[in-house]
Image: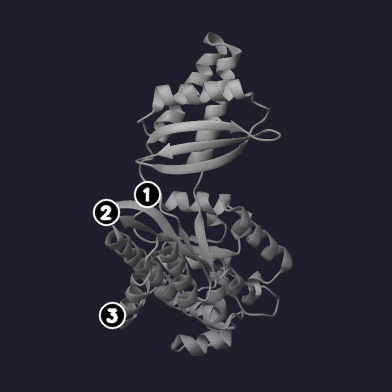
Amino acid sequence: MGGSELTERAQHLLKTLVECHIRDGQPVGSRTLARHAGLELSPATVRNVMADLEEMGLVTAPHTSAGRVPTSKGYRLFVDSLLIVNPLQGEEISGLRDQLGEQESLPDLLEAASQMLSGLTQMAGLVMVPRRERFVLRHVEFLALSDDRVLAIFVVNDSEVRNHIIHTHRRFTASELEQAANYLNYEFSGRDLHDAREAVLRAMREAKEEASALMQRAVEAADEALREEQDQADYVLAGQTNLMGFSELADLQVLRQLFEAFSEKRDILHLLDQCLGSQGVQIFIGQESGYDALGGCSIVTAPYQSEGHTVGVLGVIGPTRMAYDRVIPIVDVTAKLLGAALNTRR
């Protein structure tokens, strides 16, 4: 639904209601709304408009005698059609640029960016660790550990060594692991890891009919290791305890689900992955994220670039009752400044 489907009066009242609720965190009554709207309207007229907006699913009354609050649908219409963004001033941008410019290492830079996002918004700030476009496999070795665990040692790109402990569905012998490593090194040395894994998966399908049982086990071990290497995405999170200060997120069960999502990372990383190909700011309101743990939250994200290529996403997580006019430019500018800082470090 676009704002054009509402009358100008209804748009103005919805915008005023959302702004009042964001500011005060309370249901907005008709008298309060009439006073803040600056229109010559009686409370009865305002109530009639609110009834129409409620019927359209844009506002709801949490209690029988209380005022209204925006729904996720109402916030979406507000953000898409009614919001006026307040851009950051030159001095603010210069200050943020200086903060990032002081960081020498990549971990410190990412930590500073997430802290900036959290500090400026008083919500949770997160920055995805940059993903390199290519990981070229140079050499791999497997070492059996106790139980069903295997140490995979990868040499990628020029001389970068990456170790992963993988948990396999059964125990592999030293001979099987050696054969898996030899297979990978012979077939895929000098090739991109993603391409290598795709080829291994094809080999697994073919091995069921054409190769020995030992070869099947070898490519299974190789696939497990390559998948583990591909999945080494991560993000830096700051200010998650800020969310405990918002009444709508203060329920113990809501907080538990939210902090479990932060800890497990998988769902949030999947959400950030969806934003890697986007242009500019993306906003997920309530259930739009697709994850129950984030159902009471809004996530504002923006991709950041290095050398002209998108390598990650950063953003802010907070309640749906967030100051979008302030958060959106903060996220947008921080993404641009982080990309600039990454280019300077090269």
Specify whether 258 is left or right of 233: right
For residue 159, which quarter of the picture? top left
Specify whether 32 is left or right of 249: left
Name the mark nearer the viewer: 3 or 2: 2
Which residue is depicted at the point 46% across and 49% down? 273
Relative depth, front residue between 286 and 239: 239
Distance CA(mark 3)–CA(mark 2): 24 Å
Above or below, 246 against 279 in this view is: below
Which residue is depicted at the point 55% across and 41% down? 164
Which element carries disc 3, helix, strand or loop?
helix
Task: Please provide percent x and percent y for residue 336.
Answer: 32, 64
Distance CA(mark 2)–CA(mark 1): 16 Å
**Label 2 Cα crowd, 10 Å radius (few <14 / some 14-19 / many 20+):** few
Say whether residue 282 is visible. Answer: no
Task: Please provide percent x and percent y for residue 265.
Answer: 57, 53
**Label 1 Cα crowd, 10 Å radius (few <14 / some 14-19 / many 20+):** few
Among the two numbered marks 3 and 2 on one chain, the one whose residue lies closer to the N terminus: 3
Task: Please provide percent x and percent y for residue 30.
Answer: 57, 84
Among the two numbered marks 2 and 1 on one chain, the one whose residue lies closer to the N terminus: 1
For residue 157, which quarter of the picture? top left
Relative depth, front residue between 94 and 243: 94
Task: Please provide percent x and percent y for residue 98.
Answer: 33, 76
Which element carries disc 2, helix, strand or loop?
loop
The amino acid type, in three-letter code, at marker 1 is Gly
Q: Badges 2 and 1: C-beta atoms under 8 Å apart?
A: no
The amino acid type, in three-letter code, at marker 3 is Gly
Above or below, 273 against 167 in this view is: below
Read off the residue under disc 3.
90
Read off the residue under disc 2.
307
Distance CA(mark 3)–CA(mark 1): 28 Å
Name the mark nearer the viewer: 3 or 1: 3
